[in-house]
Amino acid sequence: MLTVRGLARLTLGPADVDLEDGQCVAVTGPSGAGKTLLLRAIADLDPAGGEVRLDGVSRDAMPAPDWRAKVTYVPAEAGWWEETVKPHFRDWREASPLVERFLLPASCGDWPITRLSTGERQRLALARALVQSPRVLLLDEPTSGLDSEATAAVETELRAQLAAGVGILMVTHDAAQADRLAQARLHIDAGRVAAVVVA
């Protein structure tokens, strides 16, 4: 279980969040409200006040890389630092079945990053996160660049992750997607957590 108490950064918060194992909470609100700030602060990518715990263990009690492997942030536009896809994965053979479930060929490991569409980059970034076997996924608009078929493939995998006990905190502007995946909603407006509504 992920617990967040009094999280505050810049114009965000203080925010309290509870995310159970196997639960999806949709984070909603207008653009600029602080949704991405919330995810980045939980992931310890930006400094923030407050307390964050996973299974009762404080984030401050473990090295940052270990925390980020367990509580993994996937931005709307992930970074890519090598020329081709495969070097971004620790084990491409392990990742290939997941990549194929996201409707991409295993051969895309040899593709140059410059060849990838926005939607292909999104799916590969999510696959890159999932092969780390995170306990919690912090997803920022994970299907914003995808067509309906690819969105369905990603949502199928997210449901499988939830069934396996992974918690998902997901920013989405798609109310229908929130209805399909989330058990609760966290609404942020002007940096303040306005409501938690059971879906």
Image (cartoon, rainbow, N blue to C red):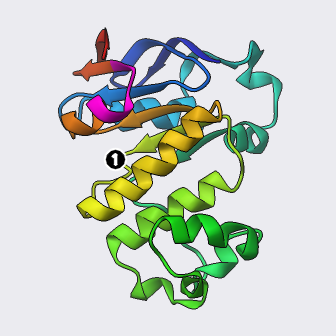
Above or below 141: residue 71: above
**Image quadrant occupied by the N terminus:** top right
Q: Position of residue 118 (x, y in %)?
A: 34, 70
Above or below 128: residue 139: above
Q: Position of residue 150 (x, y in %)?
A: 35, 63
Was residue 38 drawn as part of the magenta stretch in this picture?
no
Task: Pick whichever, 134 or 22, lies toward us.
Answer: 22
Q: Position of residue 112 (x, y in %)?
A: 51, 89
Task: Pick whichever, 74 or 36, lies toward us.
Answer: 74
Q: Is residue 174 left or right of residue 170?
A: left
How busy is the neighbourhood of tag 1: few (under 14 within 10 Å), some, or many (20 plus)? some
Q: Position of residue 111 (x, y in %)?
A: 52, 89
Above or below 139: residue 128: below
Q: Is residue 79 visible?
A: no
Q: Is residue 5 left or right of residue 56?
A: left
Q: State the residue at coordinates (43%, 13%).
A: 15
**Image quadrant occupied by the C terminus:** top left
Q: Quadrant of residue 167?
A: top right
Was residue 184 drawn as part of the magenta stretch in this picture?
yes
Q: State the residue at coordinates (34%, 32%).
A: 35
Above or below 66: residue 86: below
Badge count: 1
Q: Quadrant of residue 48?
A: top right
Q: Is residue 181 visible?
A: yes
Amino acid type for the residue under numbered disc 1: Glu
Q: Is residue 42 left or right of residue 119?
A: right
Q: Which residue in the structure is indicated by mark 1?
A: 141
Which region shows up in magenta? 179-185
Q: State the residue at coordinates (45%, 49%).
A: 156
SS at mark 1 in the image: loop
